[in-house]
């Protein structure tokens, strides 16, 4: 029996998903999330794993507790729309995320850009001439 | 009419109806309406979490949330919400199979789970405000935390009310097996609230 069939219970009978199995999977995935947090992995690995586990949890809830796996595909289309739109939104936020760091070193209006000043100093710093 | 001319009539309405989707019926209208609402609601949560991410990436002084907020209470809250998601589907299973006692017992457990979650969130908020001096006005970290968890908490409160009304109506004998659709629609809302918390718990606390 495949994992999906084990969850949905369709091979055993046609009474609907095996809710207890889904519940156990959800609890295990959440426990793994806590484990990943506690392991002290590098930040990029940790973030990737946690997001993957959270989405796996969310998909399990949507498919079996919200019955999308058993519904018509049209309903899944409604459910997928916000996922697609939020993905677009993340890309739309990228200019803000990428340029904010850039503006941090940017000069205020009416002032010279300090970065340019470093490259092309207007005047050399005054040097003290030793008195004899 | 001239003799010999045959008039062929078409049933335009029947031909037209064949090309249309089946009409919405009370049986599926509630489910469709709830899914449409949830799609919109998901956009709000998605936008809020995306904005949180953008603000956080831009701020090098952002604390590690779990170290600052603590992880124990929200982890227990997550488990409670997963349990109440499970009791909700069991309640639906009960009413769909005409088992009123199972339906009512699991519905009561679902409401209890929601109340426990809200109680723990109130406790957690009080601790953070009293001990850590957190306030929605203090800084971006605090503001995003309170707005995201608060907005979700409002959803849990709404769900507890929704499920509570269904439970009371069930105890009055007003939700027979034929009206299981009402419980299914309420279940969609409650599962969505649980699903969003899993994401908020990950993004706000763990990452």
Image (cartoon, rainbow, N blue to C red):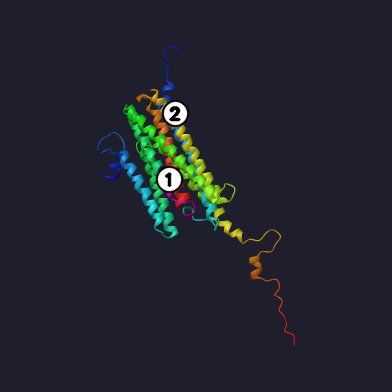
Dot 1 falls on a residue whose secondary structure is helix
The percent position of residue A1, horizontal first and vertical second, equals 25, 44
Q: Is residue A18 above or below residue A97?
A: above
**Residue at the far front in the pictured view:** B131
**Which of B95/A127 is in front?**
B95
Residue beneath label 1, please?
Answer: B198
The answer to which image quadrant residue B60 occupies is bottom right
Q: What is the magenta range?
A: B67-72
Residue B165 circle label: 2
Residue B121 circle label: none
- The answer for which chain carries disc 2 is B
The percent position of residue A5, horizontal first and vertical second, equals 28, 41
* Residue under the image location 44 percent in, 58 percent down: A44
Residue B29 visible to an observer of this rendering: no
The percent position of residue B201, horizontal first and vertical second, equals 45, 47
B71 inside magenta stretch: yes
């Amino acid at each position: 029996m495949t994992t999906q069939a084990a969850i949905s219970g369709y091979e055993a009978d046609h009474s609907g998903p095996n809710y207890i199995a889904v519940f156990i999977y959800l609890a295990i995935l959440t426990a793994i999330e806590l484990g990943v947090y506690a392991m002290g992995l590098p930040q990029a690995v940790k973030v990737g794993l946690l997001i993957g586990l959270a989405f796996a949890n969310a998909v399990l809830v949507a498919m079996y507790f919200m019955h999308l796996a058993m519904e018509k595909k049209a309903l899944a289309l409604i459910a997928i729309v916000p996922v697609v739109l939020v993905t677009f939104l993340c890309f739309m936020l990228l200019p803000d995320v990428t340029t904010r760091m850039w503006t941090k070193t940017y000069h205020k209006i009416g002032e010279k850009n300090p970065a340019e000043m470093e490259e092309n100093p207007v005047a050399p710093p005054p040097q003290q001439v030793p008195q004899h | 009419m001239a003799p010999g001319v045959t008039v062929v009539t078409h049933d335009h309405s029947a031909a037209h109806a064949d090309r249309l989707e089946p009409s919405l019926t009370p049986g599926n209208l509630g489910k469709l309406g709830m899914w449409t609402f949830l799609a919109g609601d998901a956009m709000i949560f998605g936008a809020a979490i995306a904005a949180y991410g953008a603000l956080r990436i831009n701020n090098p002084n952002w604390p590690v949330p779990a170290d600052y907020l603590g992880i124990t209470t929200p982890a227990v809250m997550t488990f409670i919400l997963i349990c109440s998601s499970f009791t909700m589907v069991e309640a639906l299973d009960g009413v769909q199979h005409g088992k009123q006692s199972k339906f009512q017992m699991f519905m009561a457990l679902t409401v209890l789970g929601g109340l426990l979650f809200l109680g723990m969130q109130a406790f957690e908020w009080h601790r953070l405000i009293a001990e850590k001096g957190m306030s929605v006005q203090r800084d971006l970290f605090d503001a995003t935390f309170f707005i995201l968890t608060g907005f979700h908490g409002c959803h849990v409160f709404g769900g507890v009310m929704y499920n509570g009304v269904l439970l009371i109506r069930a105890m009055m004998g007003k939700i027979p097996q034929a009206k299981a659709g009402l419980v299914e629609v309420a279940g969609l809302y409650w599962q969505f609230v649980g699903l969003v918390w899993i994401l908020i718990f990950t993004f706000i606390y763990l990452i």
